[in-house]
Image (tube, helix red, strand yellow):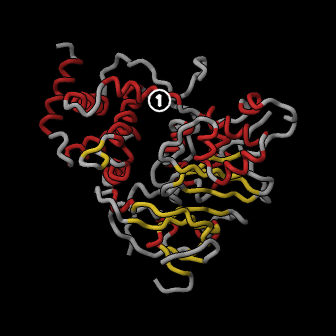
Amino acid sequence: MSFSAGDRVRVREMYPPGHVRTPFYVRGKAGIVERVVGEFDNPEELAYGREGDKRILYRVRFAQRDVFPQTPSGSDTIDVEIYEHWLVPEGDGR
Amino acid sequence: MSTTHRHPHVYHPEHHLPSTYYEKLTAAVMELLVEKGFFTAEDVRREIEAMDERCPERGARMVARAWIDPAFKARMLEDGSAAMRELGLDPGDMRLMVVENTPSIHNVIVCTLCSCYPRMLMGPPPAWYKSRPYRSRVVREPRKVLAEFGLQIPDEVTIRVHDSSADLRYLVLPMRPAGTDGWSEERLAALVTRDAMIGTAVPRV
Amino acid sequence: MSFRSPHDMGGLPAGPVDTSEHASTFWEQRVDAIRELTRKIELDGRPLIRVDELRRAIESLGAQSYDELSYYERWIHALSTLLVEKGVLTTAELGRKLAEIEAREEGT
């Protein structure tokens, strides 16, 4: 799944074991692609000594009030780097 | 590199109390790897020395240069690692992203998952950066956390928290304080603290 | 239905931040040095130990150990277990070396 800056995306609600770099607090949350960072080796595989699984990394900007609705936050944002396979276009199912 | 600098991360001589299990484990791993020829004790010493060279003063140099030279600033915001190389600093594999504070935006950096930090530029992160309270709370309530550092951010300023979850490492470019017109680069750099480049402080004259 | 690893703490409640400085000790610097050196060493054209493997090993500690061990204790634990996992060191070698160091320290 490939995205561009400005695309609305949602983080998959997946909870696998293993080495995951998508923080728990953004799972299931929607944000906007702030930029395409580039292609990197998937850390989920590197964690077990396996290279060569290249994935596109995105910076996704979330409105803090969307991630932590309980805390008053105005226009504050949280930017997180998330790998392509954790993102779906906003509006899609899980 | 000034030898009169007292970096918080400079090692202290070994104390004479009995060492803990993990200190012994460290010695065991090191001695075994040396015995097996993976590296030498000299390699370890050189590595510690190289690590000691990396310190916040290097980040401060980049900030001061950016304050004085708008073209350098633009290049630094575009590619922080390339900007490091321009100043003779080796980023290694690090991909440095510089985020700029403005009158309407304040940036703060965290790694909620572990302790990712621009070590190749700044040396090791402070203890609090690696702590549970900072890692858990700064994404959820940055204003309260920054207040614990003595930093009040007005409501009309947007806080951007950057969670270093993957391959980028972040440096905050703070705003140049008022009252510094005509200052030399060196004098400006002395204003820029490590915490200002993480986002838990701002430079003050 | 979800699983949250103990290290994945963003957004969880916690106490105040201790903003004081803690200088790192010599053994902690050695941990950093060993971590960097093992990353740079290649075995069969691949890094001996990747930082991703170290992170995974730390994340596998379990909640209690994760919180009880200090930052550098977690890293040396991860380094040593990975070195055994990869067959670079054996548990027996580590055990014997630890005993040797203990004896040395006791001045025997």
x and y, in percent, of residue C31 in the image: 36, 34
In the rendered structure, the answer to whether residue C34 lies left or right of residue A24 reads left
What residue sits 78% from the left and 46% below the top? B70
Decide which of C70, B80 is in the foreground and name it. Answer: B80
Going 34% across and 54% down the picture, which residue do you hit? C56
Instruction: Answer left or right for B47 relative to B201.
Output: left
Mark 1 lies on a secondary structure that is helix
Taking the spot 35% from the left edge, 43% from the top edge, the residue there is C39
* Residue B162 place in picture, x, y as percent: 59, 56
Q: Nearer the viewer, residue A10 or B63?
A: B63
- Horizontal side, residue C56 vs residue C94: left or right: right
Q: Quadrant of residue A20?
A: bottom left
Figure disc tally: 1
Identify residue type, mark 1.
Ala
Q: Position of residue B67 (x, y in %)?
A: 77, 41
> In this picture, is C55 found above or below C90?
below
Residue in view at x 55 percent, y 28 percent = B8
